[in-house]
Amino acid sequence: MIGWFGAAMGVAALSVLGLAVAGDRALVMALLLGAGFGLALQRSRLCFLCILRDAVRNGDPRGLLGILAALAVGTLGYGIVFGAWLPNPAAPALPPDAHIGPVSWVLVLAGIAFGLGMTLSGSCVSGHLYRLGEGSLRAPVALVGTALGFLAGFASWPALYEAGIRDAPVVWLPHHLGYAGSIAASLAVLGLLALPLLARLPAREADAGRLDPAEVLRRVFRRRWPAWAGGLAVGAIGAVAYLRTEPLGVTAAIGGGARAIGDGLGLLPSRLPGLDAFAGCGTAPDAILGNAVFVGGMVLAALVGAGLAGQIAFAWPGWRVQGRTLIGGILLGWGAMLGLGCTVGVLLSGTMAAALSGWIFGGVTLATAALTLRWRWDG
């Protein structure tokens, strides 16, 4: 009963939000893309920590293959958009608003912090957001911690900017390889990463037989989507999002809100040098509305998906786990602020955009989380 009620509430809330933004095409598109993204994550369980846990502890590589599929589709989609918008990729020109960040030791530090935060809090930021729709009681604590981590990141930004970011190179692969070369190189790397994972795929389950309409609906709304299907959906949504609104990202609203509060309370430095020159989550407080609508659509669509699948549940994990969740959330926010995004904004959008920063942040974050999973801090 709670599932159907939750699904109905989600549909109603999405309708109200849709009516509220109906006069703005960009916000309507942000809402639609956010809803699609949230539904894809919830139904395919594309949480980066869950994916790593399945691979590291259970030897199941399907989630990682789903992420590689998302990156491959998004890379092709971004390449098409870039070619239309910026036919000549010669330096120093960069495509507008793409998540292409500076490469420095600060980016590595951000990836380590974010990877630890994932393990301690039990998920990445996007995972906590879609789990809000499933009734997770850890998610609100983690997201509060994420906002606090952003405040800490803004406070530490001036010193770290001077020490390691100001003179760091911003490396966009098409500057060096052209569009065809960068796409080919990215797909080759993704293919090489996929080969050992494909060899570890579990035996294919027997097909359930003929797919009548009822079975199709059951597979879409009740059963878990295959990881590859979720990955393809995320990659396509990522390319369309960049074409129509802005790159995928889920932390700009959290970071912008934290920055507005910190400024209002006088908690932040008077100057954050260079921050707003970079695309990503380090945006000014007045530039977060579109991302807030995207995240709202994401959470509400996840509520609808979880309700229809009967996956809404409320369970208190205990104070010790919640304390660890809060600490993990703070690390998530601090890492996302310094890295100018999270596993969505930097790993997905950055890598799709052929930014070296996306590859580095993604590799460091996932490696850190994989190594620390053995301590079972995510439980």
Image (tube, rainbow, N blue to C red):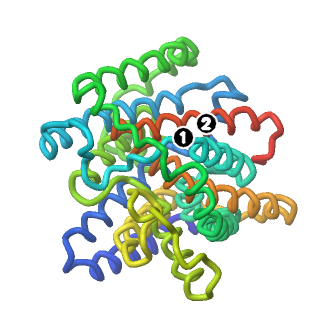
In the image shown, does 74 or 337 lie closer to the viewer? 337
How dense is the environment of label 1, judged by Cα within 10 Å: few (below 14), some, or many (20 and up)? Answer: many
How dense is the environment of label 2, judged by Cα within 10 Å: few (below 14), some, or many (20 and up)? Answer: many
- Which mark, by number, is residue 20? none
Q: Quadrant of residue 24?
A: bottom left
What is the CA distance from the residue labelled 1 to the residue labelled 2? Answer: 5 Å
Which residue lies at the image location 46% right of the left edge and 69% below the top edge?
Answer: 253
Give the quadrant of the N terminus: bottom right
Q: Quadrant of residue 68?
A: top left
SS type, badge 1:
helix
Q: Amino acid at mark 2?
A: Val
Q: Position of residue 195 (x, y in %)?
A: 48, 14
Q: Amino acid at mark 1?
A: Phe
Mark 1, residue position: 361
* Relative vertical location of residue 185 with respect to residue 378 in this rendering, above or below: above
- Is residue 300 something that shows in the picture? no
- Is residue 107 something that shows in the picture? yes
* Relative vertical location of residue 305 with respect to residue 259 in this rendering, above or below: above
> Is 133 on the left-hand or right-hand side of 378?
left
Q: Quadrant of residue 321?
A: bottom right
Q: Position of residue 375 (x, y in %)?
A: 83, 38
Which residue lies at the image location 53% right of the left edge and 33% below the top edge?
Answer: 63
Which residue lies at the image location 35% right of the left edge and 30% below the top edge?
Answer: 72
Disc count in the image?
Answer: 2
> Is 213 on the left-hand or right-hand side of 89?
right
SS type, badge 2:
helix
Q: Position of residue 185 (x, y in %)?
A: 35, 21
Mark 2, residue position: 364
Which residue lies at the image location 72% right of the left edge and 29% below the top edge?
Answer: 57
* Relative vertical location of residue 171 with respect to residue 62 in this rendering, above or below: below
* Relative vertical location of residue 335 with respect to residue 213 in this rendering, above or below: below
Q: Are marks 1 and 2 in contact (CB under 8 Å)?
A: yes
